[in-house]
Amino acid sequence: MSRLIVISNRVSPPAEVGNASVGGLAMALSAALREENGMWFGWSGEVAESSGQISIQKIGGVTVALTHLEEQDVQEYYNGYANKTLWPLFHYRTDLVAFERSFDEGYSRVNQRFADTVSPLIVEDDLIWVQDYHLIPLASKLREQGVKNRIGFFLHIPWPAMRVLMTLPKHGELVETMFDYDLVGFQTEDNMHAFTEYVINQAGGEDLGDGRLRAYGKTIQVGAYPIGIDAKEFVEASRSQTAKDYWDLMRDSQAGRKMIVGVERLDYSKGLEERFTAYDQFLRDYPQYERNVFLLQIATPSRGEVGAYQDIRGKLDTLSGHINGEHSTIDWVPLRYVNRSYRRDELAGIYRAAHVGLVTPLRDGMNLVAKEYVAAQNPADPGVLVLSEFAGAAAQMRDALIVNPFDREAVSEAIHEALSMPLKQRVARYEGLIHGIMTEDVVSWRKNFTNDLKGKPPVKKPEPLVVVSG
Ligand SMILES: O=P(O)(O)OC[C@H]1O[C@H](O[C@H]2O[C@H](CO)[C@@H](O)[C@H](O)[C@H]2O)[C@H](O)[C@@H](O)[C@@H]1O
Ligand SMILES: O=c1ccn([C@@H]2O[C@H](COP(=O)(O)OP(=O)(O)O)[C@@H](O)[C@H]2O)c(=O)[nH]1
């Protein structure tokens, strides 16, 4: 049986099977790796004097191979090209993109180092699955080392429109490296079409049908594989003692008020500034909610070494202070703004206590919080999800109240609609959503992807050279 080798920037297998504090993706990949006798390779998250060494250990039944990075690598590859160049660009924030040649060099160098370190561990028939924007050129580097195994790539973040991508220096070189994969997966059909548009119009490629694209003398398979949560596990987590304790805590502190919840990493792509402004608008538009509602916003600090993340944190500190200063009364604070992180079983209780889940990113690959919020609800008395049309999740979750996060008046109206929605309609919407969450879960996501990757011809043969005579 072939092994599965997952390669990602971060490696996070749970130390114990069924640990409710660990993310669905980590659980799903770990389950796949246990079943397929695989290995998870990536950055340890540690900085070292020198890199290139590998430490192999078993964590929760999963073989994990970790490598350290040097300080310069972290600055140029992770903070630099990944999080100052690609992340803002792929989330349509061209105003925040910083491009420096040293970032590009660091990105290439770390991808090369990943390839050098992992390739001696790869044996014939291993299936290789590369995750996310940190490692786009990895397949090219592995092919240069003679790796002929099937290699798949999944992009967790959006793929941008052609003209947006073209603002990236050397965009063609980056896209060309994607043709060294056998299968390239996106979160949505929209993302896949944006990629196809680039390939046809910029790379002079061809759409061969059935998801096959040909360019740069190579043919790859592309597809949309929307990621889900570990739905069964999350529903169980929402019934755990911890979740019940958090539900109790929240209900006590609600004191009969309606609760709106937002949960995310503190990232400008999540639209928190626009959300706070829309909430401020809502408090002005609907004065009947004075002292009767509050927004709990959990915003976990993220990528704090990057300037744009420091800036958004400062803006939110000011804005939250402004909203509370403006609207609070001596016995009511309308916005609870929390810069901490919570375990997923704790979150499950918090989600369940909230009458509205407010998920309004300006762009998001998928957004798992939207799915977790619904999975945590009480089926007999569920809350309502308000969801941005620019989250990948919106393509599947049509029974949410879909909003344009840039339109603060529309978001204000949607909050009111959600808070005043009759039980029958809430249940109908919940039932429409939970069905999709249970069936299109993280297990089906990884099975669909790995099955399609296995379905390719066993060995990648070089494409015949087409000579155009002139
Ligand atoms: O590793 P970090 O820099 O701390 O960032 C955390 C992760 O953020 C991103 O998540 C994305 O993947 C989710 C699952 O597919 C998706 O729902 C979400 O929309 C994306 O933003 C990133 O892509 C991961 O690589 C990071 O580890
Ligand atoms: O305090 C927190 C905040 C978030 N999350 C988890 O982080 C993930 C966020 O995933 P999402 O796809 O929504 O966005 P990303 O941060 O990956 O861009 C979800 O599983 C959340 O449950 C968490 O465990 N604790």
Image (cartoon, rainbow, N blue to C red):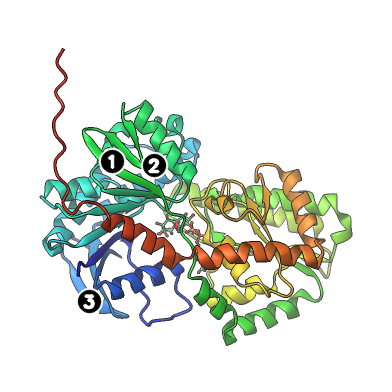
* Residue, disc 1: 104
Between circles 2 and 3, the one closer to the viewer is 3
Nearer to me, 80 or 237: 237
SS of the residue under disc 2: helix
User: Is residue 382 in sight in this rendering?
Assistant: yes
Q: Residue 412 carries which label?
A: none
Labels 1 and 2 touching (C-beta < 8 A):
yes
**Residue 437 location, x and y as percent?**
55, 65
**Residue 364 location, x and y as percent?**
52, 50
Q: Tell me the distance, in whole angstroms, between the alpha carbons under discs 3 and 1.
A: 31 Å
| 63 relative to 355 in the view: left or right | left
Labels 2 and 3 touching (C-beta < 8 A):
no
Give whichever of discs 2 and 3 has the lower sequence position: 3
* Residue, disc 2: 85
* Residue, disc 3: 57
Q: Where the C terminus falls, by quadrant?
A: top left
368 versus 185 height, above or below: below
User: Is residue 261 in sight in this rendering?
Assistant: no
